[in-house]
């Protein structure tokens, strides 16, 4: 079964969103075009509580971009984004979600962030994505979405380490920073992700 996972294509990450990925909205039409080629389409969503510890607003005297240590893990502080059940956490209206069979929610625990669609950042808890794919007997997965240098990268790398043949459709991804995107693409490649 040809499988596509759309990573975090949400309003807060596209044009006008609180954590806008430059050019994020430009991949929506491209993804709508490729969706037709897949038998199974899944999507991940950041799904944060208002008091999520990754939000700079929840830390006194801290700014967006600061890095703090929480439970032994480095945590970048972000603007408030993708708060569950808000417009920012929704898929863009222009994204054709009629074929999306399942949405995997991540980052919903207050005390730990989750860049990967498979696990939280401490690898303490699974999101259920791996189990779902195995039940369906999926061996190969293609990935698209946001952001190249964060959630997409960690999801693709975890996909490989979970034993899936993993490809990233490079035309259908965008990232926050040009230099960190280049590093992310090289890192993905070095871990066995196929870039197409």
Image (cartoon, helix red, strand yellow):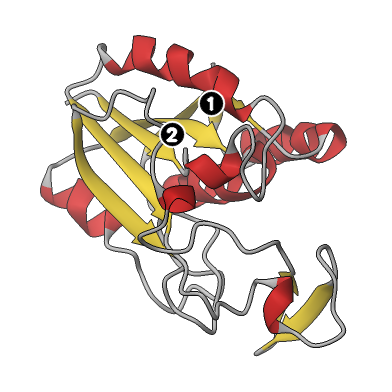
Q: Is residue 177 left or right of residue 34?
A: right
CA–CA distance between discs 1 and 2? 6 Å
The picture quadrant where one finds residue 91 is: top left
Can see residue 170? no
Crowding at dot 1, Cα within 10 Å, few <14 / some 14-19 / many 20+, comes out as some
Place of residue 42 in the rendered image (x, y in percent of width and height, measured from the top left): 28, 39
Quadrant of the image containing the C terminus: top right
Q: Is residue 49 left or right of residue 56?
A: left
Q: Are marks 1 and 2 in contact (CB under 8 Å)?
A: yes
Q: Determine which residue is flagged by label 1.
A: 194
Q: Measured along the vertical axis of the image, is residue 114 above or below residue 184?
A: below
Q: Determine which residue is flagged by label 2.
A: 166
Q: Secondary structure at mark 2?
A: strand
Q: Measured along the vertical axis of the image, is residue 134 above or below residue 7?
A: below
Place of residue 136 in the rendered image (x, y in percent of width and height, measured from the top left): 12, 43
Task: Tell which circle, 1 or 2, labels the residue nearer the N-terminal end.
Answer: 2
Place of residue 103 in the rendered image (x, y in percent of width and height, measured from the top left): 27, 48
Residue at horizontal 67 percent and vertical 24 percent from the top: 23
Crowding at dot 2, Cα within 10 Å, few <14 / some 14-19 / many 20+, comes out as many
Place of residue 45 in the rendered image (x, y in percent of width and height, measured from the top left): 40, 51
Residue at horizontal 65 percent and vertical 50 percent from the top: 18
Is residue 53 or residue 125 the one in the foreground? 53
The picture quadrant where one finds residue 61 is: bottom right
Is residue 126 or residue 61 the one in the foreground? 61
Is residue 40 or residue 20 the one in the foreground? 20
Can see residue 13? yes
Total labels: the figure holds 2
């Amino acid at each position: 079964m040809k499988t596509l996972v759309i990573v975090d294509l949400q309003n807060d990450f596209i044009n006008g969103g609180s954590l806008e990925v430059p050019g994020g909205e430009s991949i929506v039409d491209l993804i709508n075009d490729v969706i037709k080629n897949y038998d199974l389409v899944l999507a991940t969503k950041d799904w944060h509580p208002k008091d999520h510890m990754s939000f700079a607003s929840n830390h006194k005297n801290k700014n967006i971009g600061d890095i703090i240590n929480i439970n032994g893990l480095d945590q970048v502080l972000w603007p408030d984004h993708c708060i569950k059940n808000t417009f920012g956490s929704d898929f863009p209206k222009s994204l054709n979600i009629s074929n999306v069979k399942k949405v995997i929610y991540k980052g919903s625990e207050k005390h730990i962030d989750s860049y990967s669609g498979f696990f939280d950042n401490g690898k303490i808890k699974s999101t259920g994505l791996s189990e779902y794919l195995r039940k369906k007997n999926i061996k190969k997965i293609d990935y698209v979405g946001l952001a190249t240098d964060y959630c997409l990268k960690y999801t693709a790398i975890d996909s490989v380490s979970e034993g899936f043949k993993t490809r990233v459709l490079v035309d259908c991804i965008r990232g926050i920073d040009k230099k960190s995107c280049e590093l992310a693409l090289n890192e993905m490649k070095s871990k066995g992700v196929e870039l197409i």
